[in-house]
Amino acid sequence: MKFILSAILLFFACITYGQRADWKGSWITNTEDTTATKAPYFRKTFKLQKKVISATAYVVGVGYHIVYVNGKPVTDAVLEQAYTRYDKRLLYKVYDVTALLSKQNTITQSIAAELGNGWYNIQSHAVWGFQNAPWRKTPRLLLDLVIKYTDGSSETIATDDSWKCATGPSQFNCLYTGEIYDARQEVPGWNQPGFNDASWAHALKTSSPGGTLYEQVMPSIKVIRRIKPVSVKNLGNGRYLFDMGQNFAGVATLRVKGKAGTKVTMYYGEVVKDGELDMKHNTEHMRSMPGELRFQTDVYYLKGSGNETFTPRFVYHGFQYVQVETDNTLPLDIHSLEGLFYSTDFKEAGHFTSSDTMVNKLYAAARQSYRSNFLSIPTDCPQREKNGWTADAHVSTEVGLWNYKSAAGYRKWLDDVSDAQTADGAMPGIIPSNGWGYDIPGDEEHTFGPAWGSALSFVTWYMYLYHGDTALVQKHYPAIKKYTDVVAKEAEGYLFKYGLDDWMSLVQTPRTFTSTAYFYTDAVLTAKMARILGNKADEATYTKLADSIRAAFNRTFFDPATGHYKDSTMTALSAAVFHDLASPEVATTAVGQLVAKVQRSNYHADFGVMGTKYVLPVLSERGYGDVAFRMLTDTGYAGWGHWIAHGATTLFEDWPGELSHNHIFFGDYCAWFYKTLAGIRPDEEAPGFKHFFLQPVFAKGLNFVKADYESRYGVIKSEWRRNGGGVRFSFEVPVGTTATVRLPAGVLVSPKVKRVVIVGQALDEVVVGGGKYVFDLKI
């Protein structure tokens, strides 16, 4: 039975992540000089022989590609294709271009492409060293245009050295800096069939980047919203400051009219200082060489032929403000700029709203930060780094899964994680990695530890929990097991003493405490996944390992004489409970300490990214939902509400707000809204919401809460409203599923109610099937 299950799972995995084996094209480029800065053009003309039934373009253009058929773009997506470690994995895009071909067979047709550098050929300098990436080469293209005729025959127009190449107006493009575009160098009609390319050079056949080719099944990056400036300020001397009114990832479209050769420079940023854009903010990791373009800067040279529009094509930035500077007088106004919000085009899965303005703004800020930080990979920030930091990814996964149909994005990124794992099991702190950030003993970068390296385990587990994705567990279990083993090997007496601590906390928690807590959960999750796959031997092995870690943790950090943990930061107290390291009695004591500490601190946070995952759920699960709610919405320093009260539209990297203003890793409260305030909770024994729990917390500061979530079985709805002296709780359970409703003891009068005690709370529960329900509660 185990063998049959494995075979079935692997079969479906192969269907999902299929490969195209019959490529006809060769890789082509225009130069092998990685210092060449101009974006290359490629084109090919052809004639159709018969009547066409379909035409499909299979494209790999690295770093980024824009493809045209008969002068028309094949997609409205931007920054194609998704970022991977190019020397291990390459993703190709599939475009149906049938409608773009001319129906007259005798007419010349064309296919053309422009390539940008993307992550493949980083040309500016930063501490991450992507300019020295092992995969770095010049942009290159592999393309098959497969044309099928009505008589059953087919033809493939493929890349080879018969294609023509040249360069155009894009003089430079780099993700860390920006794009330089000289409109005077535009080549009218270059992608059209009738263009005369006799003076163009032949393309060069070149090498593959090295990675295995797979179809990109995750959604592309698109413009998900267009944003108008809320104000523009004339700073004098040809300088204008545009305020977009919100922070987001993307670019700005410029509309101008002026003299040919006029230089327009667009500086993007998040902070204004002394009435102008703060040019130093977020630049600390740049190591610019003389003559390099400044961080987050686009430059446009006018061609001088009436109204002109410029949209950068191969870069994106993180910003709220754009400072525009010109070297000739140009009449700019609020209509001269428009923001384009870029994000992976995930469709929405869930929605949440409430009676509280602060809560609703926090919800919007978390979603805005999440969208700004998923552009083909989950990132930390859209401006300074754009890196796939692993802790940032796994602590925000639930935010993504509740709000968006993001599963395909995580499946893709988990492949990136597996690609990044070393032969002995180690993981880097950022993925994809160019070789930077691996946890190698004795190396100066041996700093991340299991709180970061656990991303493979945690994200795989969340995908199983929310989507029932057993195939993903099967696929990544060997790598998960290998990582748990390498952490166990490096641990000393079952304690892991390395790793980043509670990043961005105001009060430090010992790194051995937090790293060992994640090590313990790694072992627990490995055991659970072994059980899912029917591997009883591994289940026993890793359960025993988890027990040993738990015992070592409590021997080290728990004081039996006082009945308290020796470390009493908010992170430490909540971590011991959240990770299930504390016994039931000790957990009750620790939560009491946590409540007292929160109240003494006037409901302000002293924790960092780890505490943001622990504190609110631990408080609310133990009956202190009102304390958690007040802490979340308090506007004093330090806390989430403080940011919002001072105008934030996204989440910051640090409580003082000195660093990035668009980070997602403080945003787990957004998942808490669904799980706690609306009370929709997955059940790991029936993953994918085949069975789930409904256990809302009726926080005193709220008059109503409303949420919906589209599960694999249908839409789940939960809504409660205060009604006189009680609460009306309405909910919907999809047909074919069941839900266990859990409410405070005594609030629901029904003969079907069963009294239970969970983590010290007396609850009444009732099991319901598919349908719509209304409960009037005496609260």
Image: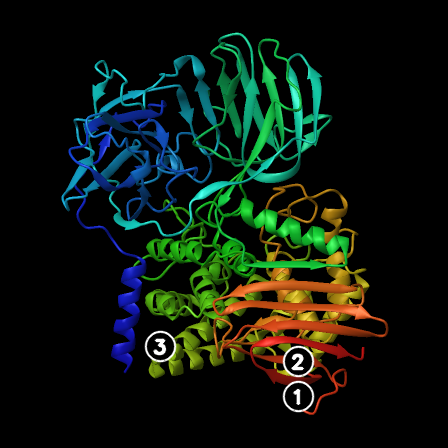
**Residue type, mark 2 in image:** Arg
In the depicted structure, whether residue 201 falls above or below residue 349: above
**In which quadrant of the rendered image does the C terminus lie?**
bottom right
Instruction: Describe the element under mark 3 as helix, strand or loop.
Output: loop
Residue 742's label in the rendered image is: 2
From the image, tell me which residue sits under label 1: 756
Residue 448 located left or right of residue 753: left
In the depicted structure, whether residue 330 falls above or below residue 24: above
Seen from the viewer's position, the closer of residues 318 and 71 is 71
* Residue found at the far right of this picture: 724
Ranked by sequence position, the earlier of labels 3 and 2 is: 3
Residue 533's label in the rendered image is: 3
Q: Quadrant of residue 113?
A: top left
Image x and y of residue 712, in percent: 47, 67
**Residue type, mark 1 in image:** Val
| CA separation in Å, label 1 and label 2 | 9 Å
Image x and y of residue 393, in percent: 50, 55
Q: Quadrant of residue 757?
A: bottom right
**Residue type, mark 3 in image:** Leu
Disc number lying in front (1 or 2): 2
Ranked by sequence position, the earlier of labels 1 and 2 is: 2
- In contact (CB < 8 Å): disc 1 and disc 2: yes
Residue 643 located left or right of residue 683: right
Q: Is residue 563 visible?
A: no
In the depicted structure, whether residue 627 falls above or below residue 505: below
Instruction: Describe the element under mark 1 as helix, strand or loop.
Output: strand
Seen from the viewer's position, the closer of residues 721 and 556 is 721
* Residue found at the far bottom of this picture: 751
Seen from the viewer's position, the closer of residues 723 and 33 is 723
